[in-house]
Image (spheres, rainbow, N blue to C red):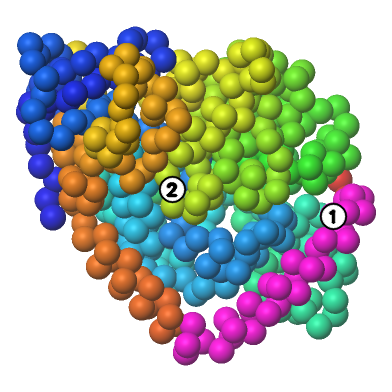
């Protein structure tokens, strides 16, 4: 299927800037050169099935994973026990993995998404793998930030590998060490890889839809010299950075032990905290830390469903807004129904953070600033989602109900009919135009099943991962990490 370019379409409702501008009835939207050219009120009701137009959604933190957690047998695991489950399936074709993940996101209304590439598929040089991911983004029709994952310590957990291995049952130590123990790569070599990826993106003309970034995994997985080198390189090049921070209570415990002066203050001291930085999660950040993040202009990507699914907690989004933080919505590959449904994610975040009783701690306008990067106004990029309003508003009684109220009450990805990205129709009648998503998904699943059937080692590794998840629990409950912050 090939994306098409629409120049004019009519909608029964337009939410040009949800929560800020009032809904408009019966509007013709005209596009030109990938942008919104004009919004024209129509004298009569739009005939046929009603559609509602709103700005396309964005996903500020993700990893381009295609296999969902429950499929891997990881449902109910906290993050620390969940992470090893990501390796129970052998590496696959990176194009297939990325394309199926991107298609699922796009079909649910996401045009811009962040890829913190922490799960390398392997089997080819790294730059070639990134090129395959970039091609997938182009063919599917999404724009991505691509953060090259960088780390140099603590491959198994939040302490050095020797300490972590000693906490495990003897029978699994060798297998865990072989698979997970970190193999340090010098900071200069890691920075050079980011430069190589950026050069490839530029040379293969992916720059319009791929923004290469530095991707330090997290402070507990990156040495101070590596983080300092990234901070200097970002300042020199202007390249953005993307990093996890304070996702779980065990990371909070680690941070307080390893950085008694404050982990956010540490990031500031080494020059990492800046407007070029996005911090994923900050679920356990304190008010004074949020105030410093806001002062330095960094962005926080809040991942509501992921935090719930991995038992990490509820991020203090209301406090982030109160402190003046720039916030953005992430799905982290863990939407509530494991389906990358950004509309449901936005509704869930709003339900949790809008305030209790008569108190308001998050407004609809703040929600849409959190969930979307755009507005539907002349001159803006034509990134638009069209919902089947007859399907959503299937029990109308009154003519004066605000469509934004219905959207926040019940909208989900299944209501999306059309997605337009930079003026191109990339989803039509609920199907992705640029790729054959069902065929790609079927091919990927067939390859995975065949690889698992022929790879006895992965059967054994799955049992090891289950034992590892059990053994990690008492280590983290004890809460003493030892070591040093270097």
Left or right: 14 in relation to 160: left
Q: Which residue is mark 2?
A: 340
Q: Secondary structure at mark 2?
A: loop
Q: Is residue 474 magenta?
A: yes
Residue 375's image quarter?
A: top left
Q: Main secondary structure of the magenta part?
A: helix
Q: Is residue 45 above or below residue 472?
A: above
* Label 1 neighbour load within 10 Å: few <14, some 14-19, many 20+: some
- Which of the numbered marks, if any, corresponds to residue 476? 1
Residue stretch in magenta: 452-481
Q: Is residue 415 above or below residue 328?
A: below
Horizontal and vertical percent position of residue 4: 10, 42
Q: Reading the chain from its start, which is encountered first: label 1 or label 2?
A: 2
> What residue is rendered at 76% in x and 74% in y?
467
Q: Secondary structure at mark 1?
A: helix
> What residue is rendered at 37% in x and 33% in y?
57
Left or right: 276 in relation to 448: right
* Towards the viewer: 327 or 51: 51
């Amino acid at each position: 299927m090939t994306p098409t370019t629409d120049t004019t379409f009519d909608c029964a409702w337009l939410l040009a800037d949800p929560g800020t501008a009032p809904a408009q009835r019966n509007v013709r939207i005209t596009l030109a050169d990938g942008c919104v050219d004009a919004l024209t009120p129509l004298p009569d009701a739009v005939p046929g099935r009603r559609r509602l137009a709103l700005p396309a959604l964005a996903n500020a933190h993700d990893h381009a994973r295609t296999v969902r957690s429950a499929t891997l047998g990881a449902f109910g695991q906290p993050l620390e026990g969940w992470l090893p489950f990501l390796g129970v399936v052998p590496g696959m074709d990176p194009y297939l993995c990325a394309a199926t993940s991107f298609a699922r996101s796009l079909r649910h209304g996401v045009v811009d998404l962040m890829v913190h590439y922490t799960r390398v598929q392997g089997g080819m040089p790294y730059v070639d793998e990134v090129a395959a991911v970039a091609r997938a983004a182009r063919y599917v029709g999404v724009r991505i930030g691509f953060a090259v994952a960088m780390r140099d310590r603590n491959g198994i957990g939040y302490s050095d590998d020797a300490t972590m291995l000693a906490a495990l049952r003897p029978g699994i130590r060798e297998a865990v060490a072989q698979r997970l123990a970190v193999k340090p790569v010098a900071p200069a070599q890691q920075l050079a890889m980011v430069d190589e990826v950026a050069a490839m993106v530029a040379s293969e003309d992916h720059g319009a839809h791929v923004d290469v970034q530095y991707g330090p995994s997290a402070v507990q997985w990156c040495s101070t010299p590596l983080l300092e080198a990234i901070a200097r390189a970002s300042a020199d090049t202007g390249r953005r950075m993307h990093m996890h921070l304070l996702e779980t209570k065990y990371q909070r415990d680690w941070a307080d032990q390893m950085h008694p002066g404050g982990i956010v203050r540490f990031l500031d001291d080494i020059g990492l905290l800046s407007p070029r930085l996005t911090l994923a999660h900050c679920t356990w950040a304190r008010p004074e830390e949020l105030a410093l993040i806001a002062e330095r202009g960094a962005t926080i990507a809040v991942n509501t469903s992921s935090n719930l699914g991995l038992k990490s907690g509820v991020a203090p989004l209301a406090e982030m807004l109160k402190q003046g933080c720039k916030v953005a919505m992430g799905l982290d590959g863990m939407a509530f129904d494991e389906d990358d449904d950004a509309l449901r994610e936005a509704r869930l975040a709003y339900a949790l953070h809008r305030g209790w009783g008569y108190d308001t701690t998050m407004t609809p306008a703040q929600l849409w600033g959190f969930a979307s990067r755009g507005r539907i106004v002349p001159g803006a990029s034509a990134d638009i989602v069209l919902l089947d309003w007859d399907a959503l508003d299937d029990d109308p009684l009154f003519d004066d109900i605000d469509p934004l109220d219905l959207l926040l009450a019940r909208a989900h990805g299944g209501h999306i009919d059309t997605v337009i990205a930079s003026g191109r129709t990339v989803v039509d009648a609920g199907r992705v135009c640029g790729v054959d998503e069902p065929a790609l998904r079927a091919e990927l699943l067939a390859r995975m099943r065949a690889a698992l059937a022929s790879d006895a080692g992965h059967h054994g590794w799955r049992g090891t991962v289950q034992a590892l998840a059990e053994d990690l629990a008492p280590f983290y409950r004890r809460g003493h990490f030892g070591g040093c912050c270097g």
